[in-house]
Image (cartoon, coloured by chain):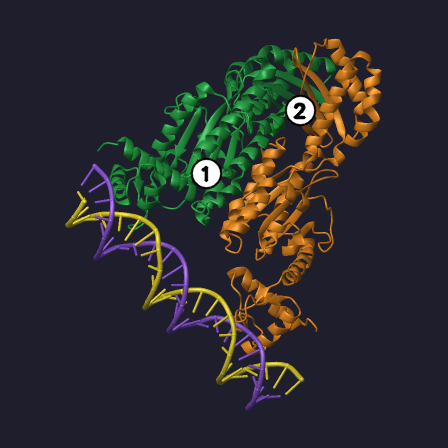
Chain colours: A green, B orange, C yellow, D purple
Amino acid sequence: MELDARKKKILQAVIKNYLETGEPVGSRTISKYTDLNLSSATIRNEMADLEEMGYIFQPHTSAGRIPTDAGYRLYVDDMLSEKMAAMKIDVEQAEQEDEAHEEIDRRIDRIEEVLKDMAKMLANNTNYTSMISMPQPNKNRLKFVQLTLVDPEKLLTTVVLEGNIVKNEMIKLDKEIDPETLLKLNILFNNELNGKSLREINFEMAANMADSAGELGELVSEIINAISAAIGSADGIQIFTSGATNIFKYPELSDTSRASGLIGTLEEKELLTGLLADTAEEDGAENTGIQVYIGQETSVSSMQDCAVVTATYEFEKGVYGKVGIIGPKRMDYEKVMDALKNVTGSLDKQFRKPEK
Amino acid sequence: MELDARKKKILQAVIKNYLETGEPVGSRTISKYTDLNLSSATIRNEMADLEEMGYIFQPHTSAGRIPTDAGYRLYVDDMLSEKMAAMKIDVEQAEQEDEAHEEIDRRIDRIEEVLKDMAKMLANNTNYTSMISMPQPNKNRLKFVQLTLVDPEKLLTTVVLEGNIVKNEMIKLDKEIDPETLLKLNILFNNELNGKSLREINFEMAANMADSAGELGELVSEIINAISAAIGSADGIQIFTSGATNIFKYPELSDTSRASGLIGTLEEKELLTGLLADTAEEDGAENTGIQVYIGQETSVSSMQDCAVVTATYEFEKGVYGKVGIIGPKRMDYEKVMDALKNVTGSLDKQFRKPEK
DNA sequence: TGTTAGCACTCTATTAATTCGAGTGCTAAC
DNA sequence: GTTAGCACTCGAATTAATAGAGTGCTAACA
């Protein structure tokens, strides 16, 4: 069977209406809603076809139609290609964006706070649940190490990673250490380890360095361990979520078991990494930087009744983070995509400009 | 009216039964359940009295009785005083504790991770929601400052606070700075600011120091700002929660609006600070270190149908953190208190021992 | 005087029966 | 190819009927 223009128009009408109402939509509604000027009977015939093609279905015999995942998918893909076209004109971006701007300008260095605020704002604006991942630095290369004596028996190891992620690790000393040695150690580590990633440090270096340090060998390897730990702890993608309770606004998600599952995965966060993984540019979305996962497509089982929309922002050259929205399948995709575009645009600008 | 021994026994029976079943309990049940050998009619009379005294009530005319907040309060207070007595004997602590031990021994320095794990474990063990606050350092006194040049135009300010909380702040430089000046600045800041709290720094120092720094005045005040920001950001009590979804296990909390409210406050966390504030030793609990808030007593409106039990642990001499459990009023208070005792005991031991 | 048996009464929860209406599929006519 | 019309289906909402748990009260009993 062919999906001709009229069928498509009807399908879109069904989906649009369902997005608004959340109720199954019947033939009569469509007959009035569209400018096709067709009777409900005709619409019925067409809808039967659309059902056969797998785009819509009836929850029970005498109810209206509801879009299937495939139906949503078609709808979203269409929208994305339209967005693509629109982006070449690219005007009219300046509405809600301002709010975002203000929020960010104040303190660029506190990335974490900024991202948390962003997530909160996004959740509030859209009435869905938002999530945002810390930019994933480039394989966590080491940029800089600083060893500092905090008190006679505590050595503070400050580690700066590519992308200016800063981590600290405290080491308890067995015996005191004189300033001169400390200086030497500082120089040693910065010379040896600069630009190295976690993998490289572990195997290649540890023995090597401990050797050449003589009697300090033990301390050196302890410090290396601390550094590895610091890098490692930055390794797990950090994710912030906000607006979890928004799901209660959508009846189809707010029954006990579904809600519990959803909030559970939001709390655990581990499963979210999959959604926010560094998929760069995937299929479908070509170059809008936006991915849409509908229902089953997410692979996260607690989200099979949800849709997830994600977008990518650039923190530094080659260092990306992701923003995402989780909502019911009948979410307002257009609004969500716009909101995400705004946020990523904002973040791009804010993070990259001072870099020049 | 007098709360004689028999009435008390009946009240306890009612509460105990209600804790188990979650259903209103009737006179016949009690008549069989207790060893008082009284007929249901007698129990009925007594129950009418207990109701008049405000310890129990009927959800509707022909239902059994449910404990009021006052009833729970009596019950819990009794239990606490029993616990007090038992603590002097203080054996039999070694069951679930082991699990906690293992968890902690591995890495003492990563407090945050430890606490998160603890929260998770606690939530799993009890099937309620848990929360745990980072130890609140002593009015945030400054212990140590380290200025480091990360690259030619980025200055990293590392701030160590009393209690070894470490914070970082990145400053963008307008012009380059030579190593000598950097050293001077480091010495300057550590001499001037050591042991100072946020309040003291702001007013007394800023002008003073900027003055004596001459042409570096601007940079100095920028650094002071960064330090203030770092201290300030440590100021908000950090709280970790776990097991939010456990509330769905209790029907009286899991209807949409209640659950939504609860999870909202857990997500926001701000309101939790009130519950985990440094109340040291409060009334009632005398010296068990355990506080219990029942229903209205919490003042957090979304928790009016909950009970909250908190305990205090000592991170360092004079630096305390809190652990808490949130559950339905009919929670298993005994189990919860034991679990909390275990956790705080564990934390106390782990944190304090290496300090010696 | 405290305890108990008995009974009428109340109120909820459950189930069954009824009704309503939205929507469909099919047929026949245009 | 489109539409009007009609019989039919099925869920949702309303109402009615029933069962049962629990109470309060009264009267009798030890």
Q: Amino acid at mark 1?
A: Gly
Image coordinates for residue B159, horizontal then vertical, percent = 71, 25
Task: Chain letter for mark 1, please.
Answer: A
Residue A320 seen in the figure: yes
Image coordinates for residue B33, horizontal then vertical, percent = 53, 70
Please say if B80 is above or below A81.
below
The numbered disc on residue A237 is none
The numbered disc on residue B168 is 2
Task: Chain letter for mark 2, please.
Answer: B
Nearest to the eye among marks 1 and 2: give it: 1
All told, the count of numbered labels is 2
Q: Is residue A138 left or right of residue A294?
A: right
Residue at 54% from the left image edge and 47% from the top image edge: B260
Q: Nearer the viewer, residue B38 or A315?
A: A315
> Marks 2 and 1: in contact by CB < 8 Å?
no
Q: Residues within 10 Å of mark 1 (few under 14, many from 20)?
A: many
Residue at 62% from the left image edge and 20% from the top image edge: A159
Q: Amino acid at mark 2?
A: Asn
- For the C terminus of chain B, the image quarter is top right
Residue A26 seen in the figure: no
Residue at 27% from the left image edge and 43% from the top image edge: A44
SS of the residue at dot 2? strand
The numbered disc on residue A327 is 1
Task: Determine the image quadrant of residue A97.
Answer: top right
Q: Nearer the viewer, residue B237 or A153?
A: B237
Task: Determine the image quadrant of residue A84.
Answer: top left
What's the CA distance linking mark 1 and mark 2? 36 Å
Q: Are marks 1 and 2 on the same chain?
A: no
Image coordinates for residue A143, horizontal then vertical, percent = 59, 15
Image coordinates for residue A241, horizontal then vertical, percent = 53, 35
